[in-house]
Amino acid sequence: MAVKLENKYLYSFISSEEYDEILPQIKIAHKMLHLKTGLGNDSLGWVDLPNTYDREDIKKINKAAQKIRHDSNIFIVIGIGGSYLGAKAAIEFLKSHNYNFLKKNTPKIFFIGNNISSGAISELLEMCKEKEVSINVISKSGSTIETSIAFKIFREFLENKYGKEKAKERIFVTTGKGSGILRKMADEKGYISFDIPQDIGGRYSVLTPVGLLPIAVCGANAEEILNGASAAGGDFQKNDIENNICNKYAAIRNILYKKGKQIEILVGYEPRLYGITEWFKQLFAESEGKNSKGIFPSASIFSTDLHSIGQFIQDGNKIIFETVLQIENNSLDIVIKKSKNDEDKLNFLEGKTISHINKKAFEGTVLAHTDGGVPNIILNLKNISEYTLGYMIYFFEKACAISGYTLGINPFNQPGVEAYKKNMFALLGKDGFENEKEELEKRLKNSER
Ligand code: PA5
């Protein structure tokens, strides 16, 4: 198994009776997912995707990625939420969080359209000036405002730089099958386009062209990611806790939640895991945070954050548990050398590798945090590879769905995200929001007083 779950640091927090108690609920959740009888059952295309994926699509993705690599030294991914976090996470995990600074023969990859910052957009436009640029706009709905604005600006940039016809060859569109503004535009203008299946929601879409095209551009093997996910699908079939780590993780989370642990921190000891922790945050927050329920997902890189939020975790309000991602085989390593007269007082580390020291930091922290009343779940990742990445992605997706059903919510919608959009559109004067505009402006004025 490319991902293993260790629960040995949970013994003082969860009893075997508590596992027995939650087992029936977990079994029902697992069944609901497989029989497609639960809420949001029209969004379960991701469950069988790694096995049903059309391998011809992979060929199309690889061909597009090759063209992008050949034509560009900058590749821009335009999207927000589930339409960019998975790709970013994968590229950082497989290549590096410093990917753009590495010596390589693949383009630099930038992500935009994930905020409404004129500073961020202007900066990227400036960086693109003397460069060869291709873009991939990703939006299932085709109408997300952040994405649409950035796409407009970079489409116009390409058209000015290359002319309308040549720009077309540098615009790649990934959007929902069927209707939508972006689909219409792609069809009318003749951009190369990819479909996002209707039955796969944004945060479950990294194993579709949403994630796979940008991942392929960085030179990673998309097919091997699907192989890892497919193996995970096979390994997580059993409907019990002992032989299925998705069920086990979902069970642990729900037991801890009932005991007042309202915050989960996903921890990595390697900066290359930062993107994964950001993707995880979105997956679990949008899936579980509803009906006034849910565990608040947070993320940290240690030992970095041990020098900031570490104090709170160890000593503060006991509402936290941690899930720690550990990479078993780290090929890059550095050995500490002896210094003359022990001038830096580091000779006690002579001959030890940085990975060894990091491992001891992890062990010391797990013991300290569990002593401080913070339960720790450990997820061991076999290595840094496409296969392990696919396996891990599938693990989190399935665990999230089972955990959400156990919590009693629909893990596949995100009604709460609409509230800010509605207000923003009304305040911007979009057609159809006239009444709301007046009322919101009044409220803004009143709160000024
Ligand atoms: O998980 C989700 O569904 C969301 O985070 C979406 O991915 C995000 O809102 C972007 O939507 P779209 O792809 O339609 O632009």
Image (tube, rainbow, N blue to C red):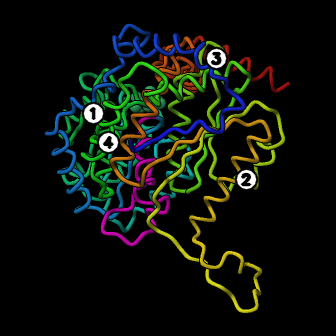
Indicate the quadrant where residue 391 lies. top left
Which residue matches tag 2? 306
Please say whether residue 96 is one of the residues in the magenta stretch: yes
Q: Specify start and end residues of the magenta stretch as a single range.
A: 82-111
Q: Amino acid at mark 3?
A: Glu
Tell which tag, 3 or 2, sits nearer the viewer: 3
Tell which tag, 2 or 4, sits nearer the viewer: 4
Mark 2–mark 4 Cα distance, whole angstroms, equals 32 Å
Secondary structure at numbered mark 2 = helix
Q: Camera-side residue: 150 or 260?
A: 260
Q: Crowding near pointer 3: few (<14 within 10 Å), some, many (20+)? A: few
Say whether residue 252 is left or right of residue 4: right
Mark 3–mark 2 Cα distance, whole angstroms, equals 33 Å
Give the numbered dot on residue 50.
Answer: 1
Q: Position of residue 295 (x, y in %)?
A: 64, 26
Residue 144, can we see it? no
Which residue matches tag 4? 228
Secondary structure at numbered mark 4 = helix
Which residue matches tag 3? 17
Residue at 57 percent across and 19 percent down: it is 416
Q: Which is more N-terminal, label 2 or label 3?
A: 3
Q: Amino acid at mark 4?
A: Gly
Indicate the quadrant where residue 252 lies. top right
Residue at 60 percent across and 13 percent down: it is 21
Q: Are marks 3 and 2 in contact (CB under 8 Å)?
A: no
Mark 1: C-beta under 8 Å from nearest atom of ligand 1: no
Q: Position of residue 411 (x, y in %)?
A: 49, 19
